[in-house]
Image (cartoon, rainbow, N blue to C red):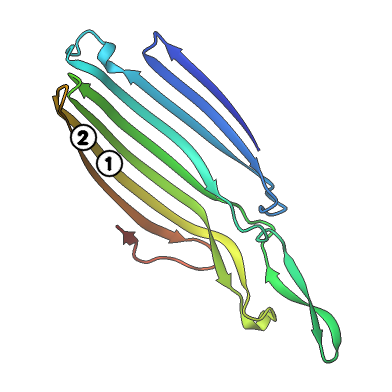
């Protein structure tokens, strides 16, 4: 694979990072040998603005968008897999696996934003919220026995899902002395996943499935 990254900053206050990654894998089908993932990250130091109270040692807003993927199994892109067989009537070959030359990796798109702040070096708060969209999920579809493949399954890109979550992390150091240092931490998080479709082959979800 290959990756290209460009980092930029302005006034040592605003930061922007752009990236693009391309993966090549034999696990992908013959019709799709490569996959690309763009990415972007932006952050700005709000504490350097004049109207922000000086008690903020740091007040940063950040946002990011990125894409990633989950590769199919290493043999999912092969049309047919054969294995040798030896029996009482002699040796031969039998089909041991059915693949999909058009198989693609599951693609995950994510948008995240957050706020980081430090107050008088006593309290630090980190807030993060994200949304994810997964498409082309690899589902192994059982083949009809009449096709003559036995109990084999074929991989297809037919699933899609939405995910969202929130996380808050609070750190406090109310006591800082030579012989005593007290630190507290509180973490609150929430996430939810929702299956929104099994596209293709006549499969439809009448009711969305929510996984908390």
Q: Which mark is residue 167?
A: 1
Q: Position of residue 160 (x, y in %)?
A: 46, 55
Q: How many dots with numbers?
A: 2
The mark lying in front, picked from 1 and 2, is: 2
Query: Which residue appears farthest toward the bottom when viewing the image?
Result: 88
Residue visible at 30% across and 31% down in the picture? 114
Query: Are there few (<14), some (14-19), or many (20+) residues within 10 Å of tag 2?
Result: some
Residue 188 in the image, given as x and y percentages of width and height: 22, 44
Task: Residue under label 2, please give it.
Answer: 170
Residue nearest the observer in this picture, 123 or 109: 123
- Left of 138 or right of it: where is 10? left
Residue at image point 27% right, 41% down: 167
Direction from residue 116 to residue 3 in the image, left or right: right
Res. 123 image quadrant: top left
Q: Quadrant of the C terminus?
A: bottom left
Instruction: Residue 150: name its quadrant.
Output: bottom right
Q: Are marks 1 and 2 in contact (CB under 8 Å)?
A: no
| Depicted 27 relative to depicted 46: above or below | below
| Residue 173 horizontal side relative to residue 65, left or right | left
How far apart, in angstroms, are the residues tagged by discs 1 and 2?
A: 10 Å
Towards the viewer: 185 or 155: 185
Coordinates of residue 154 in the picture (x, y in percent): 62, 68
Q: In percent of the image, x 26 and y 48: which residue is there? A: 190
């Amino acid at each position: 694979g290959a990756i290209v990254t460009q980092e930029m900053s302005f006034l040592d206050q605003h930061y922007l990072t752009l990236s693009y990654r391309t993966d090549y894998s034999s696990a992908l089908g013959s019709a799709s040998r490569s996959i690309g993932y763009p990415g972007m990250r932006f952050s700005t130091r709000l504490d350097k603005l004049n109207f922000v109270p000086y008690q903020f040692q740091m007040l940063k807003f950040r946002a990011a968008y990125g894409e990633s993927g989950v590769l199919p199994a290493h043999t999912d892109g092969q049309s047919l897999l054969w294995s040798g067989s030896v029996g009482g009537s002699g040796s031969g070959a039998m089909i041991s696996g059915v693949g999909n030359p058009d198989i693609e990796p599951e693609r995950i798109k994510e948008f995240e934003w957050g706020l980081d702040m430090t107050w008088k070096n006593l309290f630090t708060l980190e807030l993060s919220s994200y949304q994810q969209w997964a498409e082309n999920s690899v589902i192994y579809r059982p083949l009809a026995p009449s096709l003559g493949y036995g109990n084999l399954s074929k991989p297809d890109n037919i699933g899609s899902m939405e995910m969202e979550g929130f996380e808050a992390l609070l750190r406090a150091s109310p006591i800082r002395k030579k012989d005593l240092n007290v630190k507290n931490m509180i973490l609150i998080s929430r996430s939810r996943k929702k299956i929104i479709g099994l596209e293709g082959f006549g499969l439809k979800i009448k009711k969305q499935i929510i996984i908390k």
